[in-house]
C-alpha cells in the first residue's frame, strides 16, 4: 500500500451521477400524478405533466426547454458572421497603407514605377476578395506590407481548416511549411479512409493506422471510424449552414477568398472531396439549413461553425426535451450536451426526471392494461392512499379536541403479543417493550441510558387486542355536475382514497362501500372512483345512494353501521317504480319524501350518520340539519382542504362510540 502524505484537494465529483446521492424520492411524483389521475388525467398524461413541471427542488422539462430556447436566442442576438471578412479587410488595409508609406519614402525609385504602383493601389476593386486576388502578383516594396498580405493567406487557410477541424486555427498559428505539409498529408489519408468506408470496405485496421499517424489532429479522440465520421459530418454540416446563413455578397466574397487559403488550390480540393464523402455517409445531417444572426460580435469561420454546431445541439436538445414523438423517453436526452449548453445543474435536473420516469415504470407503479393504456398499479394506489391518509392525520392532529378521535379506549381483550405502533392503531401501549426499544436505540446511537432516554415514534409498541366491534362503513359521495364545477371533485376523491387506505390497512375487519350519487347512484371500487371523470349530467339522487347503502348494511347485520354522506346540494332526483331517475329543480316534494323515508329506515336500524356539507347553500343547510335531527346524526361543514381529515375523524368517532356502547350503534 502506498500512502500519500501530501496535501489533499477536494472538489465536486465529476465522474457522472453522484454515487453518494440519495435515491430518487417518488413520494412527490406519486402524489402529484395520483391527484392528476383523480382529476381526470390519464396516467400517461399525468406522468408527462409532472415531468414537464418538475419537482419542488428541480427544473422540469418546460423550464429546461425554455432555457434552451433562451440560449439559442442569445447566440443569434450576440453574433454576426462577417468576422473573417472584417479581419481580412483590416489586414488588406494595413498592407496597402504600409506600401503607400514605403513608396512615399523611397526617393531612389523610378518615378514612373512609383506612379504606376500608386495607381494600382488606388484603383483596387471595392471587393475585398477581388483586391486580394489582384495583389497576388504584386511586388511589395514594404516588408511590413508583404507580411500583412501573407498573413491574409495564412489566416484564410487556418479559418477554412478550423471550419472542419475545431481548434485548427489556433494550432496552425505561426505554422511552418512542414506543419502545412502534415495537414495536407492528413487530408489525403482521411479522404482515402472515407472513400474505402464509403465503398463498404472493412476499415478497422485502416482507422487505427490513421489515428496512429494523425490522431493529434482530433482532440475528440474518436474510438471508431463511425465516431470519426459523426464528428466530421456534424462539423462540416455546420460549416455549410454557416455559409448559407450569410448574405449572398458575404458568401461570394468568402468563396473567392478561400481560393487564396495558404496559396494552395490543392487544400480546397481535398476539403471539397472530404465534404462530398461526408454528405454521402451522413445524408441525415442538416446540410441545407440557415440562421438569422443579428448581433455585433463578428465571428470567424471556425468560431462561426462552432456556434452553428451549438445551435444544432440546442435544436436536438429541444426535440429531446419536447418528448413529442411516440416512444420518447427521458433516457434519450443527451445529458452531456445539456451540461455543455446550460450547465451541470440542468443535467442533474434532467437526470432526476429520467430516474423518476424509469422508477415509475420499472418499480411497478404504472402498469399497462389489456387495452394497452397505462394505469396506476395497486402498489401505486396504496402508496398514494398512505400519503393522503398521512395528510389527513396531520390535519386531524391539529384540530381542537382531536385527541378524542384517537379512540384510545376502543379496544378489546389483549392477546399477549405486541407490535410496532402504526397510524390508526387504537391499542394501549406496551410500556415495557417501548422503554426497552428506546434504551436499545440510545445505546446503539452512542448515548448513555443512565443520563435519560427520549422516546421516538419508532420506539412505540402497542399491545395486540381483539376488536370488540367491527364497522360496515358506507361513504356516499356526491358526483353531480356542481361538484366538478365548484372544484370539489378532487378533494372528494382524496377523501375516499384516504378512508379506503385507513380501512384496508389499519381496520381490516371493517367493511367499506364507496357509493357515488349523481343522476343515478352506483357502488364502485376505489380504482373506478379514482379514475371517474367529472360528470356533466345534472341530478343529486341521494335516494338511490341510500338504497344502495341499505343493501350494503343488510349484508353485514352484525357490524356497526356507519353512514358518511358528502354532498354540496339538496336532492334533485329519485328513483321511480320502473327504475328510471326523475329529475326536478327545484327539488320536488316527492324527491324529498322518498329520500327522507329511506333515511328513516336506516336510522331505525341503528345507523350512525354524518353529513358533510360542502358550500353555503341555505337550502342544503336546512335539509341536512333536518335530516340529521331525524336520526340523531351529525352535520359537519368542513373547508375543502379539511374534508379528508373530517371524514377520517368521524369514522374514528363512530368506531369509538360503537365500542363504548357495546356495539349497539346508538349515539351516546
Image (tube, helix red, strand yellow):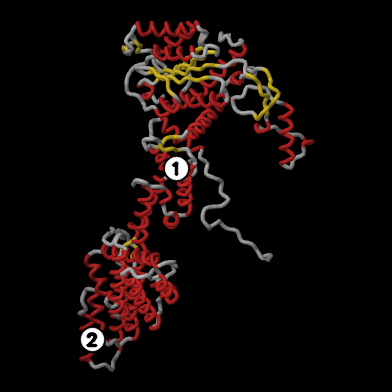
Of labels 2 and 1, the one closer to you: 1
Q: Residue furthest right?
A: 450
Identify the residue shown where x is 50% and y is 26%: 498
Measuring from the top left, give residue 384's x and y in whole percent. 49, 32
Q: Is residue 647 visible?
A: yes
Circles 2, 1 touching at the beta carbon (< 8 Å): no
In this rendering, position of residue 108 left or right of residue 358: left
Identify the residue shown where x is 42% and y is 12%: 547
Viewer-side residue, 219 vs 384: 384
Classed neighbour count for the residue bearing mark 2: other residues with Cα under 10 Å, few (<14), some (14–19), many (≥20): some
In this rendering, position of residue 13 left or right of residue 96: right
Viewer-side residue, 513 vs 271: 513
Using the image, tell me which numbered label, if any, was put on residue 364. none
Secondary structure under tag 2 reads helix
Q: Earlier in the sequence, mark 2 or mark 1?
A: 1
Identify the residue shown where x is 20% and y is 76%: 125
Quadrant of the rendered image containing residue 59: top left
Measuring from the top left, give residue 531's x and y in whole percent. 40, 29
Measuring from the top left, give residue 298's x and y in whole percent. 33, 65
Secondary structure under tag 1 reads loop
Q: Disc 2 to disc 1, how far (Cα)?
A: 70 Å
Q: Which residue is tagged 2?
A: 117
In this rendering, position of residue 580 left or right of residue 626: left
Q: Is residue 491 visible?
A: no
Q: Is residue 577 above or below residue 217?
A: above
Figure label count: 2
Q: Which residue is tagged 1?
A: 54
Classed neighbour count for the residue bearing mark 1: other residues with Cα under 10 Å, few (<14), some (14–19), many (≥20): many
Q: Is residue 329 above or below residue 113?
A: above
In the rendered image, which quarter contains the C terminus? top right
In the rendered image, which quarter contains the N terminus? bottom right
Q: Is residue 303 above or below residue 60?
A: below
Amino acid at each position: 500500500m502506498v500512502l500519500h502524505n501530501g496535501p489533499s484537494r477536494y472538489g465536486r465529483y465529476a465522474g457522472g451521477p453522484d454515487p453518494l446521492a440519495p435515491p430518487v424520492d417518488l413520494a412527490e411524483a406519486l402524489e402529484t400524478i395520483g391527484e392528476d389521475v383523480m382529476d381526470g388525467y390519464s396516467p400517461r398524461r399525468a406522468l408527462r405533466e409532472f415531468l414537464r413541471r418538475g419537482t419542488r427542488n428541480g427544473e422540469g422539462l418546460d423550464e429546461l426547454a425554455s432555457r434552451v430556447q433562451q440560449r439559442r436566442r442569445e447566440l443569434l442576438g450576440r453574433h454576426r458572421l462577417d468576422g473573417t471578412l472584417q479581419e481580412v479587410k483590416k489586414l488588406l488595409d494595413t498592407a496597402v497603407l504600409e506600401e503607400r508609406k514605403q513608396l512615399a519614402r523611397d526617393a531612389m525609385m523610378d518615378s514612373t514605377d512609383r506612379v504606376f504602383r500608386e495607381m494600382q493601389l488606388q484603383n483596387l476593386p471595392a471587393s475585398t476578395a477581388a483586391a486580394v486576388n489582384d495583389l497576388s502578383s504584386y511586388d511589395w516594396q514594404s516588408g511590413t506590407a508583404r507580411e500583412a498580405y501573407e498573413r491574409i493567406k495564412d489566416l484564410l487557410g487556418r479559418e477554412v481548416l478550423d471550419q472542419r477541424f475545431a481548434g485548427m486555427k489556433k494550432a496552425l498559428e505561426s505554422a511552418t511549411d512542414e506543419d502545412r505539409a502534415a495537414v495536407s498529408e492528413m487530408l489525403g489519408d482521411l479522404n482515402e479512409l472515407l472513400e474505402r468506408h464509403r465503398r463498404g470496405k472493412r476499415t478497422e485496421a485502416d482507422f487505427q493506422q490513421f489515428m496512429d499517424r494523425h490522431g493529434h489532429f482530433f482532440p475528440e479522440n474518436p474510438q471508431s471510424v463511425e465516431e470519426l465520421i459523426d464528428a466530421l459530418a456534424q462539423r462540416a454540416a455546420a460549416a455549410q449552414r454557416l455559409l448559407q446563413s450569410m448574405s449572398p455578397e458575404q458568401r461570394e466574397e468568402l468563396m473567392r477568398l478561400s481560393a487564396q487559403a495558404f496559396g494552395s488550390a490543392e487544400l480546397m480540393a481535398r476539403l471539397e472531396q472530404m465534404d462530398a464523402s461526408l454528405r454521402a455517409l451522413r445524408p441525415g445531417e442538416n446540410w441545407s439549413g440557415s440562421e438569422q444572426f443579428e448581433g455585433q460580435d463578428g465571428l470567424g469561420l471556425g468560431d462561426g461553425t462552432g456556434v452553428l454546431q451549438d445551435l444544432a445541439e440546442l435544436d436536438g436538445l429541444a426535440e429531446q426535451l419536447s418528448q413529442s414523438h411516440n416512444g420518447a423517453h427521458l433516457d434519450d436526452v443527451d445529458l452531456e450536451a445539456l451540461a455543455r449548453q446550460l450547465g451541470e445543474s440542468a443535467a442533474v435536473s434532467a437526470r432526476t426526471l429520467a430516474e423518476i420516469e424509469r422508477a415509475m415504470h420499472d418499480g411497478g407503479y404504472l402498469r399497462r392494461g389489456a387495452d394497452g393504456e397505462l394505469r396506476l398499479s395497486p402498489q401505486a394506489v396504496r402508496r398514494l392512499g398512505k400519503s393522503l391518509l398521512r395528510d389527513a392525520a396531520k390535519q386531524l392532529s391539529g384540530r381542537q379536541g382531536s385527541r378524542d378521535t384517537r379512540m384510545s379506549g376502543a379496544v378489546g381483550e389483549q392477546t399477549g403479543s405486541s407490535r410496532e405502533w402504526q397510524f390508526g392503531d387504537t391499542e394501549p401501549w406496551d410500556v415495557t417493550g417501548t422503554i426497552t426499544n428506546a434504551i436499545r436505540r440510545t445505546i446503539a446511537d452512542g448515548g448513555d441510558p443512565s443520563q435519560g432516554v427520549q422516546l421516538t415514534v419508532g420506539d412505540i409498541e402497542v399491545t395486540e387486542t381483539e376488536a370488540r366491534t367491527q364497522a360496515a362503513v358506507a361513504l356516499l359521495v356526491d358526483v353531480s355536475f356542481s361538484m366538478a364545477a365548484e372544484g370539489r371533485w378532487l378533494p372528494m376523491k382524496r377523501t375516499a382514497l384516504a378512508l379506503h387506505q385507513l380501512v384496508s390497512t389499519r381496520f381490516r375487519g371493517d367493511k367499506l362501500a364507496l357509493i357515488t350519487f349523481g343522476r343515478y347512484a352506483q357502488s364502485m371500487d376505489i380504482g373506478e372512483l379514482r379514475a371517474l371523470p367529472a360528470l356533466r349530467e345534472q341530478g343529486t339522487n341521494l335516494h338511490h345512494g341510500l338504497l344502495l347503502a341499505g343493501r350494503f348494511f343488510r349484508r353485514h347485520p352484525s357490524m356497526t353501521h356507519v353512514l358518511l354522506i358528502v354532498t354540496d346540494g339538496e336532492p334533485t332526483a329519485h328513483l321511480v317504480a320502473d327504475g328510471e331517475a326523475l329529475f326536478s329543480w327545484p327539488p320536488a316534494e316527492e324527491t324529498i319524501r322518498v329520500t327522507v323515508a329511506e333515511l328513516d329506515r336506516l336510522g331505525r336500524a341503528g345507523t350512525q350518520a354524518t353529513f358533510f356539507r360542502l358550500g353555503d347553500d341555505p337550502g342544503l343547510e336546512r335539509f341536512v340539519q333536518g335530516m340529521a335531527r331525524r336520526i340523531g346524526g351529525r352535520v359537519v361543514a368542513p373547508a375543502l382542504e379539511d374534508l379528508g381529515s373530517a371524514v377520517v375523524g368521524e369514522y374514528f368517532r363512530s368506531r369509538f362510540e360503537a365500542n363504548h356502547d357495546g356495539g349497539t350503534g346508538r349515539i351516546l
